[in-house]
Image (spheres, grey):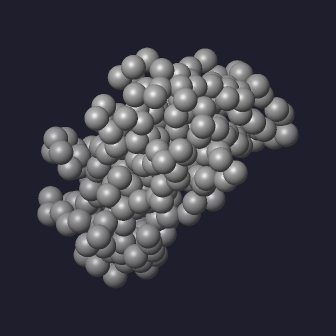
Amino acid sequence: MGVVVTDAEVTLADVLSLRLAIDEPLQEGTELVLRNRTTGVERDVRLGTRGARSREATLAVSLAPLDLSAGRWDAYLRGANGKRSRLRSVDPGFSLDHLDAYALCKRTLAYRSYRTRNGFLALKISDAEPAAEVRAIWFREGRFEAMGLLAYSGLEDDDSRHEATLTLDRRQTSARVTATAFVQGVRFHAAFSLVDVVAADPASSDTAAGSGTWEPALQVEGVPTPLKLGAWLDDVDGKRRRLHYPSAKVDGVPIKPCYTADDELRIEVGG
């Protein structure tokens, strides 16, 4: 059975929408099989219907009822004879505008379709907690600045302004720096003085004491928990290895942003 996905998207209602180019009509009893890449757990959905003759097919599969856990799920087609094959895809499955719109809804799980490096359809499912998705960071006039959007917060994308505070915490010493942040709708802009960070914990600038790592968070009116800053919505995995920012210096102390293995933003001072 020759089947290729030409368009794949998870809609705002968590429905996997597929357009297929097919050599032969899907037979009655054909199933879409989703297999967890780590655990091997499988979920299947019957697709084929009697009398179908089209060379193209449009499918819609509701994902929430399938009870899929967080992780990577590979897609297969299984025929009525029990044979199955991985589902090929020519759609890269990436639209930043769509991902932004998807992240505006409050969710517990986030579903995303994508094409693997080998050209197959797969799903990436992640736990979805309210977070501050960083889209740009820079040093300017002695300050560190970040801007982006609030993901999965449930706030409306409108012109409403919300009181917000940016906090920087260094767990090793319990030092904290706070600054006022600007939030309009779901868009945020936050900044802090580099001088204030160095002054808040002099030990972090002492090379003998090691590098001081600071964790930023955004506290926003109307959102019950502090929001981590990071970059999760795009298709760049492993930002700690791939994204390297230049450092600024305050009184000879280097300061630079970086990402953790989980794509959370950190500020490294000294070291």
Please tell me whether residue 52 is drawn above or below residue 238 in the rendered image: below
Which residue corresponds to the image point at 81% horizontal and 40% vertical from the top-left?
158
Furthest toward the front, the residue is 251
Q: Nearer the viewer, residue 67 or 262?
A: 262
Which residue corresponds to the image point at 52% horizontal and 38% vertical from the top-left?
229
In the visual, does 115 lie left or right of 18?
left
Q: Position of residue 256 (x, y in %)?
A: 47, 49
Please tell me whether residue 218 is drawn above or below residue 266 in the rendered image: above
Q: Is residue 229 at least partly visible in the picture?
A: yes
Q: Position of residue 90 (x, y in %)?
A: 40, 76
Q: Is residue 104 at least partly visible in the picture?
A: no
In which quadrant of the rendered image does the C terminus lie?
top left
Please tell me whether residue 134 is drawn above or below residue 86 in the rendered image: above
Quadrant in the rendering for residue 165: top right
In which quadrant of the rendered image does the N terminus lie?
bottom left
Which residue corresponds to the image point at 52% horizontal and 50% vertical from the top-left?
249
Q: Nearer the viewer, residue 175 or 4?
A: 175
Number of marks: 0
Q: Nearer the viewer, residue 42 or 121?
A: 121
Q: Position of residue 26 (x, y in %)?
A: 34, 68
Q: Nearer the viewer, residue 8 or 177?
A: 177
Quadrant in the rendering for residue 211: top left
Q: Position of residue 227 (x, y in %)?
A: 55, 29
Which residue corresponds to the image point at 29% horizontal and 70% vertical from the top-left?
117
